[in-house]
Amino acid sequence: MRGFVANTDDEWYRFLSARPDLDEVNFWQPGGEREFKRLAPGQPVLFRLKRPHDAIAGAGFFAHFSLLPVSLAWAAFESKNGAGSQSAMRSRVRRYRRRFGKPTGPGGTAGSGASSSRSRPSSRRDPGFETGGWSPQSVRTLCDRRYVTITRDYRLEVSRRIREEFENGRDYYALHGREVRVPPDDAERPAPILLEWHGTHRFRG
């Protein structure tokens, strides 16, 4: 099976390894400009700590890649980015960019081109809520933040405000209209009336 060894930041690793309850993590690098095409969904990622450790510290399964601004990566994954706050993540982005000789922008916005690939620490799936390349949890986070809703016929609707407020989000727009696979048993499906309420009263259309 094909896999990928990802050089991993020690702070990112220590922060996430202290949270064994997480069902996925967001592995990112600052200043992303090119798409990552070396893995297909489901293929393994090995997290290799840099010097002085020089060791494989963990593994996951690749789910998806996207170019995202830091603000949108934080909105989708929050602490699963390996930081305790968005400001801490931005600080780390700026530090990495200085280390590799890339200029930072004013106001700490240097990470607006951050690339994100998501790897799950286990193969566990959330039954009844699958959306193709994006994980259930990241879509739920955007639902909670009212940027995504689900229609009565179980299709994703993505708010135009993602583009207006985050200057990006084309990968999320690719999900617009995508069918959400739900359990065959009606009793286990989200109630259509509740979906309609979310779309009418919560969704930022």
Image: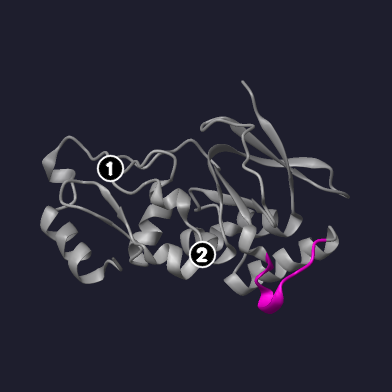
Report if residue 106 lies within the magenta region. yes
Q: Is residue 43 visible?
A: yes
List the single residue furthest toward the right: 52
199 and 135: which one is in front? 199
Foreground residue among 162 and 134: 162
The quarter of the picture where the C terminus appears is bottom left
SS at mark 1? loop
Label 2: few (<14), some or many (≥20) within 10 Å?
A: some
Q: Which residues are magenta?
A: 102-110
> For residue 167, which numbered disc appears in the image?
2
Query: Which amino acid is tagged 1?
Result: Val
Question: Which residue shows up at 72% across the image and 66% down it?
Answer: 92
Picture coordinates of residue 101 (x, y %)?
A: 85, 61
Residue 5 x, y percent position in the rendering: 72, 36
Which residue in the protein does label 1 denote? 180
> In the rendered image of this protein, does residue 87 appear above or below residue 195?
below
Query: In the drawing, does residue 95 fall left or right of residue 86?
Result: right
Colour approach in the figure: one colour
Specify the quadrant that holds the N terminus.
top right
Residue furthest out toward the top: 1
Q: Quadrant of residue 104?
A: bottom right
Hey, what amino acid is under mark 2?
Glu
Q: 21 left or right of 115?
A: left
Q: Residue at x 62, y 52 (%)?
A: 115
**Residue placed farthest to the bottom in the image?**
107
Cα distance between the residues tagged 2 and 1? 26 Å
